[in-house]
Image: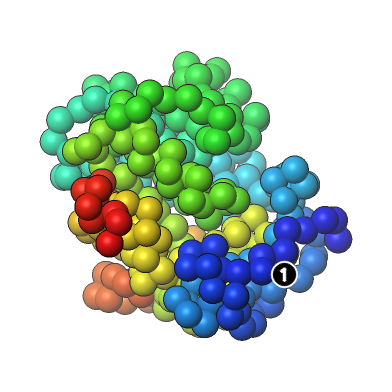
């Protein structure tokens, strides 16, 4: 195992009272086991000994890890089908809360399908994507020029009407720095939309350590509704809505289960249950506004 960054305290609340939660295996690249711990004070879950930014690249270096849909096979075909259905759904969600257009910045933009769709809807677009392969695809296929590391991107203060992060922030090492940058870029009346796997979901409880969305060590942070709300409060954002992300339960279940027919059936069941109890859905979309300065200090 290569060098790791050991967390001595909770990155959310600073408590040093940590307890083991479960051990998950990297099934895509290394076969290594990684411990996920829970803060006794605030309940936040995180990967204890994750590789540092300079070392984690090797855990993405496999044809099996193509969340942008660049690989082939049944799972990738399903991913692309779901992605195309969801483009319109995501656009409608954003227009529900932000009625005017403007600049939208997508964090973890992948191959650029979402930004290309939003540009066709009349938005100005910008984005960040760590993968050089995905950025090149976005440039060639969609004429999009994406920044690389979000921590190196240089958008002007209060320039963004909307910032989105679809399954992105769980990959980024410095959460406070990231939140500070997003807050700096967002207009006072801007919208922040974050989608992440839900560590307190029906499917995470069912699959346990086999739940694919643990995705260690690539996923550093494992959010529930409660801990995401605490992060937002601490970083100056006000939660205005929370939605289940449709179809994620089916996709994650297919990756988690050995029997694909049974896994798909489970995924459909979890998806339906997630509509009834959205805080237990496989993935959650959080919609934020900037909090007032006096609220941030509370």
275 in relation to 242, above or below: below
- Residue 198: percent from left, percent from top: 44, 67
- Residue drawn at x 13%, y 36% is 99
5 in relation to 125, above or below: below
- Residue 258: percent from left, percent from top: 64, 73
Residue at the disc numbered 1: 34
**Number of other residues with Cα within 10 Å of mark 1, as a class: few under 14, some 14 to 19, many 20 or more:** some
Is 183 displayed left or right of 154 in the figure?
Answer: left
Is 130 displayed left or right of 227 in the figure?
Answer: right
Name the outermost residue toward the left: 99
Name the outermost residue toward the right: 1
- Report the number of discs: 1
Instruction: Give the position of the C terminus as an image quadrant.
Output: bottom left
Residue 182 in sight in this render: yes
Q: Which of the two residues, 48 or 224, is positioned nearer the viewer here?
A: 48
91 in relation to 291, above or below: above
- Residue 223: percent from left, percent from top: 46, 66
Q: Which of the two residues, 158 or 69, is positioned nearer the viewer here?
A: 158
- Residue 115: percent from left, percent from top: 39, 30
- Residue drawn at x 41%, y 69% is 227
Instruction: Give the position of the N terminus as an image quadrant.
Output: bottom right
Q: Secondary structure at mark 1?
A: strand
- Residue drawn at x 31%, y 26% is 159
Q: Which of the two residues, 42 or 262, is positioned nearer the viewer here?
A: 42
Is 111 displayed left or right of 234 in the figure?
Answer: right
- Residue drawn at x 44%, y 58% is 196
């Amino acid at each position: 195992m290569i060098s790791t960054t050991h967390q001595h305290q909770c990155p959310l609340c600073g408590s040093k009272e940590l307890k083991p939660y479960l051990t998950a295996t990297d099934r895509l690249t290394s076969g290594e086991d990684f411990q996920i711990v829970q803060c006794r004070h605030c309940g936040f879950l995180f990967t204890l000994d994750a590789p540092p930014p300079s070392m984690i690249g090797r855990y993405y270096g496999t044809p099996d890890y193509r969340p942008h849909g660049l690989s082939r096979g049944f799972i990738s075909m399903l991913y692309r089908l779901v992605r195309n259905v969801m483009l319109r759904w995501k656009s409608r969600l954003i227009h529900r809360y932000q009625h005017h257009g403007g600049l939208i910045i997508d964090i973890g933009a992948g191959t650029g399908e979402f930004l290309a769709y939003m540009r066709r809807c009349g938005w100005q677009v910008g984005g960040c994507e760590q993968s050089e392969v995905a950025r090149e695809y976005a440039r060639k296929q969609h004429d999009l020029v994406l920044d690389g590391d979000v921590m190196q991107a240089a958008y002007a203060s209060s320039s963004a009407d909307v910032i989105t992060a679809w399954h992105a922030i769980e990959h980024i090492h410095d959460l406070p720095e990231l939140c500070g940058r997003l807050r700096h870029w967002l207009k006072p009346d801007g919208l922040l939309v974050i989608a992440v796997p839900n560590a307190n979901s029906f499917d995470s409880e069912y699959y346990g350590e086999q739940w694919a969305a643990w995705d260690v060590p690539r996923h550093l942070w494992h959010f529930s509704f409660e801990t995401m709300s605490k992060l937002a409060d601490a970083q100056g954002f006000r939660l205005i809505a929370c939605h289940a992300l449709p179809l994620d339960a089916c996709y994650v279940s297919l990756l988690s289960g050995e029997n694909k027919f049974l896994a798909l059936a489970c995924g459909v069941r979890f998806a339906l249950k997630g509509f009834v109890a959205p805080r237990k859905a496989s993935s959650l979309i959080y919609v934020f506004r900037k909090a007032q300065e006096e609220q941030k200090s509370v």
